[in-house]
Amino acid sequence: MRYSDFVNLLPRRLKTRFESIGTFVDVVVEEREGNIPKQNRLTSDELAIIKLAVLIFALQEFFREGSRAAAAAVDEFRPLGVPGFRVGSTLFEGRNPNVIRGDELAAALRAAVGAPTILDAIDHASRLRDLILDLMRRVRT
Amino acid sequence: MSGAWIDQDALKSRLNQFFDQNRSSLAAFGSTVNQTFEAFVFAAVVAWYRQHGWEVQFVHPNGEDAKRALRLKFSTRGKPSGYTYVLCRNGRRKVEIRHQLRVATRAHIEGQHARANICLDVAVIRPVDVSDYSTNDAVPVKKLVTFGEAKHMSAFAELIAGFIGVVHEMQPNRLRKQRSNRSKLREHISPFLYVSGQFYPSGQGIIETVEHRQYDIDVFCKTRALTDKFKLDTEKVAENETSLKQSLDRTAAIQTEQDIVTTL
């Protein structure tokens, strides 16, 4: 399966957020490897793993940000006498399932990934570019 | 970490399983996450005014029960009177914080053939009676105090440049050399963009030019950056709160309903 195949597994509304990340990985890798002889560059398998790891990082961060945003909003509204907010019929209140859904998805994703080396790289990165460079270094060593 | 260290097939299989087992949860998350970020941006603006000594009060449409969850406007369509807004008071000063409010642009001329207005994600305005406003009616730009925009995509250069364009349309004075130490004592937040996606280097490049051009705008990416920035402003303002309040109260006492943009 290619990177785009995994992005296509996401709900339509989320897909567009992650489509460009694969290309960004290609750009960063090319910047670093542009002058390296082809035989010494990352293999297509290694590049595929890096793209998956970056997707996992971006997804995890996005899920967590969603929960952080929901929690921050309900916490700000509550002391003003408003218990939460609705999106259509979906109520966000306190730490109800809708508020914590992002955190739960992030945890489920990490559990699914399992691979300690990838999770370690993700946990030490704060930006996409840093993660890509770290993964490239780890591949080489 | 080569392919030998990572069983690529096993990883792909587990990821497939994750998407399969969490399909309904992913769908539920995806269908509300953009609006959640918008609610967060609205809440952050409310928090700024509350933390800067303004009295804040939710005003619900049609006298609805205040204990029910507030009704935000998650679409550009809809009469503004049908949605909750926040009324902020500080001495004699009043502003309203509204969600998805249509505001005329600076260059709009009343009576022109096609209306020029932008639906702002969060608009801070001087009080306006919108009870008769239709979905297409726009608040005059002279009532606009400041605003915030939320974008649900990654921040490339084009996105940041597009936001600068919105500021140019609504409050072009913000795009002159404005920022200085004095701005830390500002009365209201500056127009800002919140991006709920990745910050790409090209976007960061534009932001750096905004900083050295000293435009009076802000760009945020992470939720923490937005909340920290507003709280941080609170800490720095607190040292001069008393003298600023006295100065502003004097100004409010003699100020008439004139275009606030021209006073920036």
Image: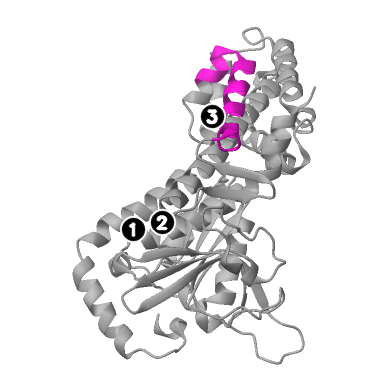
Drawn side of residue B30 relative to residue B209, left or right: right
Stretch in magenta? A96-120
Are the residues at dot 1 and dot 2 in contact (C-beta closer than 8 Å)? Answer: yes
Q: Which mark is residue A131?
A: 3
Residue A23 in view (yes/no): no
Residue B217 lies, in percent from the top left, at 46, 65
Mainly helix, strand or loop, the magenta region?
helix
Q: Which corner quadrant of the image does residue B18 belong to?
A: top right
Judged left or right of residue B219, residue B49 is left
In this rendering, position of residue B203 left or right of residue B146: right
- The C terminus of chain B - image quarter: bottom left
Q: Which residue is mark 2?
A: B47
| Residue at image location 33% in from the left, 69% down from the top | B186
Kindly identify which chain the residue marked by label 1 belongs to: B
The quadrant of the image that shows the N terminus of chain B is top right
Q: Residue furthest top?
A: B4
Q: Amino acid at mark 1?
A: Gln
Question: Which is closer to the viewer, label 3 or label 2?
Answer: 2
Q: Is residue B41 visible to us here?
A: yes
Instruction: Identify the residue position indicated by label 1 in the image.
Output: B51
Identify the residue shown where x is 29% and y is 67%: B185
Q: Are marks 1 and 2 on the same chain?
A: yes
User: Element under label 2?
Assistant: helix
Q: Amino acid at mark 3?
A: Leu
Q: Amino acid at mark 2?
A: Ala
Which is nearer the eye, B116 or B246?
A: B246
Q: Is residue A109 magenta?
A: yes
The subunit letter for the residue under badge 3 reads A
